[in-house]
Amino acid sequence: MTASTGAPIPSGSAPVAGQDWGEWIQEHTRDVALAIGAVVVVAAGIWLYVTSESRKELYAAQALTKARGDAEAGDLPLAAYDLNQLMDRYGGTRAADEGAVLLAEVRLVQGGTQTAAAVTALQGFVRKRHPDYILGSAWSMLGGGLEQQGKFRDAAAAYRTASEVVPHDFLKAQYLLDAGRTLAIAGDSAGARKAYGEVLERFGSLNQAAEARVRLGELGGTAPAPKLNGTGGQKAG
């Protein structure tokens, strides 16, 4: 049986039928104290855990802000160092996830051997569970890295996956444009036309549709008529 606190009361210590609770508590003060103590310990443990996680997220966010400042100031080696420290110390936080993508971007900007490091890290990153908006950025960044390596078909596949994962339509459309562009570079005109056509079909009212229409025409495709709003003008993005 359990007391009203929810903590277990030792077997055989429960009041019998008709016995006054106050009297029973007086007779079993130690048992009641132990039960209440157990509840307090559990509650304190939960509070400490939540507080610790909140602090971890706060410190991680501060570290990410510093790393971004280093990158914007042009000190890419320091930014990379800060981001590595962020991921080592605060792995599992939202800021650490964002830091992993930012580190890949820093490496891609540096180029050279850092490009391969960025691609390898991103390939591992996208295989794990992360929020959709972060995964979308990671897949797009991976597409950029593969493009730098001249792997245009693989880059297009990464951009398409980014479009499928990211939750916002304007980014879905943009990543499809990137997929079409890299497919065209790879010589896959049919695949490029398909990507541009998908932008027009699914996101014809967005600003990216204008570029898709131009690129599709350059590849010999036929673009559908622009989507119009109720006043006869093209819908704004």
Image (cartoon, helix red, strand yellow):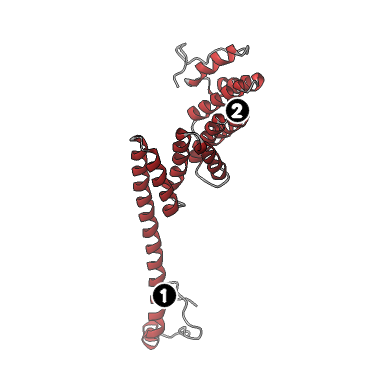
Judged left or right of residue 168, residue 62 is left
- Image quarter of residue 193: top right
- Residue at (39, 38) in percent of width and height: 76
Q: Is residue 62 above or below residue 116?
A: below
Check residue 38 in the rendering and tell me which mark sits there, or answer none.
Answer: 1
Q: Nearer the viewer, residue 106 or 128?
A: 106
Q: Where is residue 147 in the image (x, y as percent from the top left)?
A: 56, 29
Q: In this view, does 193 lie above or below 71?
A: above
Q: In this view, does 176 lie above or below 103?
A: above
Judged left or right of residue 148, residue 6 is left
Q: Position of residue 222 (x, y in %)?
A: 62, 12
Q: Where is residue 30 in the image (x, y as percent from the top left)?
A: 39, 85
Q: Residues within 10 Å of mark 2 (few under 14, many from 20)?
A: many
Q: Nearer the viewer, residue 16 or 31?
A: 31
Helix, strand or loop status at disc 1? helix
Disc 2 designates what residue? Answer: 152
Q: Is residue 28 visible?
A: yes
- Image quarter of residue 55: bottom left
Judged from this view, the residue extending furthest toward the bottom is 27
Q: Which of 174 and 143 is in front in this view?
A: 143
Q: What is the number of callouts on the image?
A: 2
Q: Distance between the residues labelled 2 and 1?
A: 61 Å
Judged left or right of residue 150, residue 16 is left
